């Protein structure tokens, strides 16, 4: 369509020419209009850029790859954790790469490097050795990849963005408290009963390369110290320092062998072990095997603690062998990890509830801590079955 011909250009030209002041005003208006239009264009461009950068985290990261590095499949809890995180992330539309390293550090290193090569946007890492991944974390940071430490803190590197776990010091307190309750030193309410013992106990700790193991042990030992000092509890082997009682890679066979050695060296004269602080169900099973082989009948087994509420140990608790376990609802832990990942991929600040406790040697890592529950024969149905973690059939 033809544009209408201008009819007033000439008079406008004359007007500008004949009225210099008006002409200057018009020129100023023209210049101002040009500047304003340019500024508006820049503003709109900036707004558009901001939306792309901020909102693009959501748009550009739709279908993003999330790497999930789990330590092993020899523990049922890690199988469940990995599967739950994968399922929940994929339900949100993300792609996942779930890998298990069979407790082999070089394997986990290679798996994480492969995730970086595949351009994962976030890594969720439950490390085997919390000090062995610095190079990979540096590579991830250089590629703009965020790192979420899952249940086990990664140490010695500043490129750990978030950490989600349970209150691990409290887990240790709960283990020690349940040991004292099982021995009858405390009643169900936590009050002292007046029993003075002495009770023979032995102490086990987790893997020295797992940061959580020290939290568990410190919580337990702070709780037991009073009773060790006043002689209510006696460690006949004399082995109480963390390095001596630690169990590399949380290996049940290692725990079983150590228990057998303790029995042979410290209890061969007829004294009996009456309590064992065990920080993990897998170790508890190994400890029970050693005790059973040494002639401890089911009704004479010591009070033995644990952690993770694994099926085998819950069955053992029901059977009257293992006394307790500390239940950590890993469904909630997995969902918290997924929430952190989703926030990171959508440009949001993840929610944390602890910014003081977890120093990895390079920084305080912001963390979200969940709470755990002591499970015994008295409450396993209420906590585990009614809570939907297991069915009755699972525990038959």
Image (tube, rainbow, N blue to C red):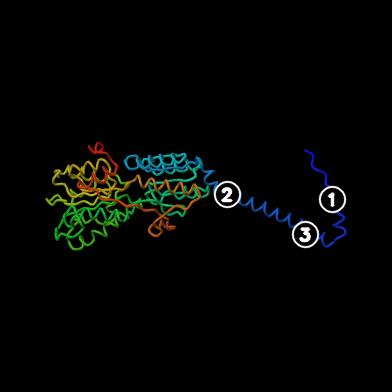
Residue 21 position in % (x across, y down): 83, 62
- In-front residue for pair 166/281: 166
Mark 2 vs mark 1, CA separation in Å? 43 Å
Q: Is residue 260 visible?
A: no
Give the residue at x 14% y 58%: 198
Q: Is residue 161 left or right of residue 377?
A: right
> Which residue is under mark 3?
28
Q: The N terminus is located in which quarter?
A: top right
Residue 97 position in % (x across, y down): 44, 39
> How many other residues sit within 10 Å of disc 2, few (<14), some (14-19) or many (≥20)?
few
Residue 363 position in % (x across, y down): 44, 58
Q: Is residue 19 left or right of residue 272?
A: right
Disc nearest the viewer among 3 and 2: 3
> Which residue is under mark 1?
9
Q: The C terminus is located in which quarter?
A: top left
Give the residue at x 80% y 43%: 4
In the image, residue 117 above or below residue 45: above
First of labels 3, 2 by sequence position: 3
């Amino acid at each position: 369509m033809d544009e209408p011909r201008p009819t007033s250009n000439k008079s406008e030209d004359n007007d500008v020419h004949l009225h210099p002041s008006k002409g200057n005003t018009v020129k100023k208006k023209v210049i101002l209009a040009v500047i304003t239009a340019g500024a508006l264009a820049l503003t709109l461009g900036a707004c558009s850029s901001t939306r792309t950068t901020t909102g693009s985290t959501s748009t550009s990261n739709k279908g993003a790859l999330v790497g999930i590095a789990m330590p092993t499949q020899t523990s049922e809890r890690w199988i469940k954790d990995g599967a739950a995180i994968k399922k929940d992330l994929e339900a949100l539309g993300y792609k996942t790469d779930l890998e298990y390293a069979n407790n082999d550090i070089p394997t986990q290193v290679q798996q994480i490097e492969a995730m970086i090569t595949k351009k994962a946007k976030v890594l969720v890492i439950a490390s085997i050795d919390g000090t062995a991944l610095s190079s990979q974390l540096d590579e991830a940071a250089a590629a703009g990849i965020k790192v979420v430490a899952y249940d086990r803190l990664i140490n010695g590197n500043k490129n750990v963005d978030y950490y989600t776990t349970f209150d691990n010091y409290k887990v240790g307190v709960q283990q020690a408290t349940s040991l004292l309750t099982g021995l009858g030193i405390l009643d169900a309410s936590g009050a002292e009963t007046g029993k003075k013992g002495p009770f023979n106990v032995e102490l086990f700790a987790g893997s020295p390369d797992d940061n959580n193991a020290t939290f568990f042990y410190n919580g337990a030992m702070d709780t037991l110290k009073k009773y060790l000092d006043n002689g209510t509890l006696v460690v006949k082997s004399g082995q109480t320092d963390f390095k001596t009682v630690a169990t590399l890679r949380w290996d049940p066979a290692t725990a079983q062998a150590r228990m057998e050695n303790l029995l042979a060296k410290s209890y061969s004269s007829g004294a009996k072990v009456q309590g064992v602080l065990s920080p993990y169900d897998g170790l508890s099973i190994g400890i029970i095997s050693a005790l059973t082989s040494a002639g401890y009948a089911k009704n004479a087994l010591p009070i033995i603690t644990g952690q993770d509420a694994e099926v085998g140990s819950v069955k053992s608790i029901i059977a009257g062998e293992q006394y307790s376990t500390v239940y950590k609802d890993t469904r909630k832990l997995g969902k918290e990890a997924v929430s952190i990942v989703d926030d990171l991929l959508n440009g949001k600040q993840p929610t944390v509830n602890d910014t003081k406790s977890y120093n990895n040697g390079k920084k305080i890592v912001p963390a979200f801590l969940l709470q755990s529950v002591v499970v015994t024969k008295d409450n396993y149905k209420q906590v585990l079955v009614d809570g939907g973690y297991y069915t009755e059939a699972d525990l038959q």
